[in-house]
Amino acid sequence: MASLRNARMVITGRGGPEVLQWVEDDLPTPGPGQVRVKVIATGVAYADILMRHGLYPVSQAFPFAPGYDIVGDIDALGDGVTGFALGQRVAALTMIGGYSRYLLVPAAHLVPVADNLDPAEAVSLVLNYVTAYQMIHRVAKLREGQSFLIHGAGGGVGTAALQLGKIAGLRMFGTASKSKLELVSALGATPIDYRADNFLDRIRQLVPDGLNAVLDSVGDKTRTDSYRCLRRGGYLVCFGVSSAVEKGKLSAALGFAWLGMMKLVPDGKHPVWFNVKWLRDAHPDWFREDLSKLFAMLAARQIQPVIAARMPLREAARANELLEKAQVSGKIILLCQE
Ligand SMILES: NC(=O)c1ccc[n+]([C@@H]2O[C@H](COP(=O)([O-])OP(=O)(O)OC[C@H]3O[C@@H](n4cnc5c(N)ncnc54)[C@H](OP(=O)(O)O)[C@@H]3O)[C@@H](O)[C@H]2O)c1
């Protein structure tokens, strides 16, 4: 009988989506404390694009498979793994590696997933919804009636933040390009067409006292005006550098310097950087608690991930191209066993 082989889509070097290549190799064997997961679904994340362009803050030698989040079934257990069983459905934040049929994951990173959840919907929660949830509830600590603006409101994290913000009773504003404005409005936010309007002027008209938080993933192009949108005590939560892809690595580095400088300004505002993996590593209990809560909300249909497309793993290059050109609303999911 032919033995099972692994297959992955790897980034072979810096460049456009065409550098993603299909490779087949041996199945990996789990070491102590690890499990092997038969990956059912993985998300396509903006971080995958930044990594491919060499713009991600954590560098990784090529070739490697990207893939920030997975849902799959445990297929083999390494020595010393307790609390998990063969065949059990699990989720994990992996940062890289998800674009694979089989993947080794430390058991400590696994979160159980109920069998009756759709794996594509479930995987949509692991990166985007935990990011949105933790920025709203763990960092800015927004309370009912408070307000926030999110840029890229029609994207994966944006749509997640609007669904969670609505549940929390928050007043919401979202910038997006024209084709996504209707979605942003349907999710309960006041949409701002940032190409047609200046978002700072719009916020000053709509909320003269300023916002309690701005969630900013664009970086260079927006962060100074995002900061100006805040009231005293407000949080600028920077969580991405989408505009770095246009401008190059320096702009990403300058973003960190700018944040450090702004922290020294005694104006009562809080500029912070958020990274879901850093917070998961610092507080694994928060990650497990928040993701389990989100899975329960999904099971109760309180949240409904916006899935832009479900595509086979082999089509990862096309999926990356769609995300990179901002041609999709919501999350693209790769199905790894198809
Ligand atoms: N720090 C963390 O832990 C963390 C976790 C998850 C994601 N992220 C980051 O969050 C961001 C959003 O991720 P996502 O998966 O939601 O991506 P996404 O689905 O592509 O959404 C991002 C949206 O931002 C807008 N956009 C893209 N480039 C832009 C630019 N140069 N200027 C203005 N708007 C731009 C696009 O919408 P329009 O067409 O409306 O412009 C796009 O739909 C990424 O930067 C990602 O790296 C960070």
Image (cartoon, grey):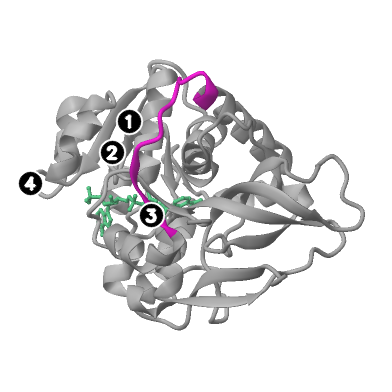
- Name the disc covering residue 311, or none: 3
Q: Earlier in the sequence, mark 1 or mark 3?
A: 1
**Are dots 1 and 3 in contact, CB under 8 Å?**
no
Which element is circle 3 on? strand
Q: Residue at x 12, y 50 (%)?
A: 195
Q: Residue at x 57, y 76 (%)?
A: 24
Q: Residues within 10 Å of mark 3 (few under 14, many from 20)?
A: some
Residue 255 placed where, x, y %?
41, 62
Per the image, label 2 sits on a secondary structure element best described as loop
Q: Secondary structure at mark 4?
A: loop
203 left or right of 291 in image: left
> Type of residue at label 4?
Ala
Can residue 208 be seen in this snapshot?
no
- C-alpha distance separating marks 3 and 2: 38 Å
Give the residue number, with chain letter if any, for mark 1. Answer: 211
Residue span colored magenta: 298-312
Tell me if mark 1 has few (under 14), some (14-19) or many (20+) residues whose alpha carbon lies within 10 angstroms of its own.
Answer: many
Image disc number at residue 229: 2
Q: Residue at x 53, y 77 (%)?
A: 23
Cα gap from disc 3 to disc 4, whole angstroms? 33 Å
Q: Amino acid at mark 2?
A: Cys
The quadrant of the image that shows the N terminus is bottom right
State the CA–CA distance, disc 4 to disc 2.
18 Å
Query: Is 300 contained in the magenta span?
Result: yes
> Of the residues under marks 3 and 2, which one precedes in the sequence?
2
| CB within 8 Å, label 2 to label 1 | yes
Q: Is residue 223 left or right of residue 32?
A: left
Nearer the observer: mark 4 or 2; the answer is 4
Report the residue marked by disc 4. 196
Name the amino acid type tagged 3: Met
Identify the secondary structure beneath mark 1: strand
